[in-house]
Image (cartoon, rainbow, N blue to C red):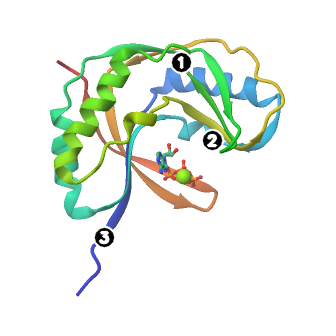
Amino acid sequence: MSARRKRRLFFALWPDAEVRNGLASAAAAVRKHGSGRSVPDENLHITLAFLGSVDEELLDCVRSAAEQVNAGAFALTIDRAGWWKRTGILWLGPSAGPAALNRLVKSLWAALEPCGFWPDFRDFHPHVTIARRWRKARLPEIRPVHWPIDALMLLESHTGQRGARYTLLERWPLIR
Ligand code: ATP
Ligand code: MG
């Protein structure tokens, strides 16, 4: 009997080139004020739902869940840096988490339930991780990044030699 293939999957907001540039320069400005392990610019994203190691047989279910998401496009402004002491994570995020983003995540987890995933949006704190094992020095103000959100992405995470690498598997436009 052959082992069934598992894939490490997560849904995310994946920035286009322009937004990624904005996030990358804000991240660089913040990281001048401390030390830790930087996240490469090409990895910057916001995780919406982490699925973990998923049996390949569930992929169709996950894909149709994404199709059922009932949420429209909205705008996100990334305007602050933050630091979580316990996890050592340095991040960028919105100071006002838009209700539309919470609705999107709720709708996504609800759609994923029939596939056997349990929602964990209770502690959903939208953020872009920009460094790990961060020792805080100072958190400067950042130049706000305007991020028009119009799609939901499914990504696969691979363990590369220099940390995680992500592959974009599919993209669903947010239309309602
Ligand atoms: P690495 O683990 O190699 O340092 P990474 O955390 O970016 O890199 P993954 O662990 O594959 O790579 O995670 C993919 C995404 O899912 C990241 O945004 C990560 O923060 C998030 N994530 C990982 N584990 C969890 C979890 N248990 N709960 C919520 N989100 C998670
Ligand atoms: Mg991880």
Give the SS element for disc 3: loop
In the rendered structure, which amino acid carries the disc numbered 1? Pro
Name the residue at the front extreme. Answer: 122
Residue 108, position in %: x, y? 26, 35
Residue 82, position in %: x, y? 66, 26
Identify which residue, 93 or 150, lies in the foreground. 93
Query: Residue drawn 70% across and 43% down?
Result: 88
Query: Residue drawn 65% across and 12% down?
Result: 143
Residue named by callout 3: 5
Identify which residue, 119 or 172, lies in the foreground. 119
Q: Is 160 displayed left or right of 98 in the figure?
A: right
Q: Is 40 displayed left or right of 140 in the figure?
A: left
Query: Residue drawn 51% across and 20% down?
Result: 18
Residue named by callout 1: 94
Give the SS element for disc 1: loop
Observer-side mark, 3 or 1, equals 1
In the rendered structure, which amino acid carries the disc numbered 3? Arg
Q: How many marks can you see? A: 3
| Label 3 or label 2, whichever comes before in sequence order | 3
Residue named by callout 2: 40
Q: CA distance from mark 3 to mark 1?
A: 37 Å
Q: Is residue 123 above or below residue 30?
A: below
Q: Is 125 displayed left or right of 80 in the figure?
A: left
Q: CA distance from mark 2 to mark 1?
A: 20 Å
Q: Is mark 2 within 8 Å of ligand 1?
A: no
Identify which residue, 18 or 5, lies in the foreground. 5
Query: Residue drawn 44% across and 33% down?
Result: 124
Image quarter for residue 35? top right
Image quarter for residue 111? top left
| Label 3 or label 1, whichever comes before in sequence order | 3
